[in-house]
Amino acid sequence: MATEVKDVPENRRYVITSDGEEAGFAEYILTDTMITFTHTEVAPAFEGKGIGGTLVREALDDVRTRGLSVLPMCPFVKVWIERHPEYADLVYR
């Protein structure tokens, strides 16, 4: 299963594809200094395959390279960051 995560700024979301098929997305609101993740969704056919975690990890890696802070309003993103403390430094305080 080959996955790819891309930022689609015109739709205000990161999208993950699996073997070319859209498998999920993470919606956001962007400002000059911060990104607020508001909703994450994985298509039912891809649930339980680690798609959501891959999506969040790669989105946060991109956010880090852009020098932004993260406000995890989405419960999935919030819990994922809590379980991966190496990303806690991104969280807006």
Image: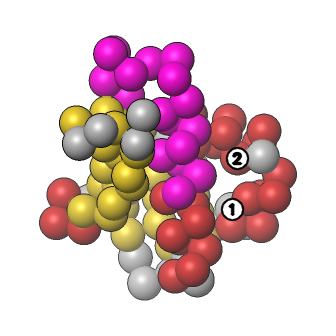
Q: Nearer the viewer, mark 1 or mark 2?
A: 2
- Region in magenta: 41-58
Q: Which corner quadrant of the image does residue 46 belong to?
A: top left
**For the residue labelled by badge 2, is the local secondary structure a helix, a strand or a loop?**
helix
Residues under numbered marks 1 and 2 in contact, where contact means CB atoms less than 8 Å apart: yes
Q: Is residue 6 above or below residue 74?
A: below
**Secondary structure, magenta segment, majority class:** helix
Q: Position of residue 81 (x, y in %)?
A: 70, 47
- Classed neighbour count for the residue bearing mark 2: other residues with Cα under 10 Å, few (<14), some (14–19), many (≥20): many
Q: Which amino acid type is shown beneath numbered disc 2? A: Ile
| Residue found at x 48% / y 34% | 51
- Residue at 53% across, 70% down: 63
Residue 81 numbered tag: 2
Question: Can you identify the residue that label 1 sits on?
Answer: 91
Dividing the picture into quarters, in which one does residue 71 lie?
Answer: bottom right
Q: Is residue 73 above or below residue 71?
A: above
In the rendered image, the vertical position of residue 51 relative to residue 60, given as above or below: above
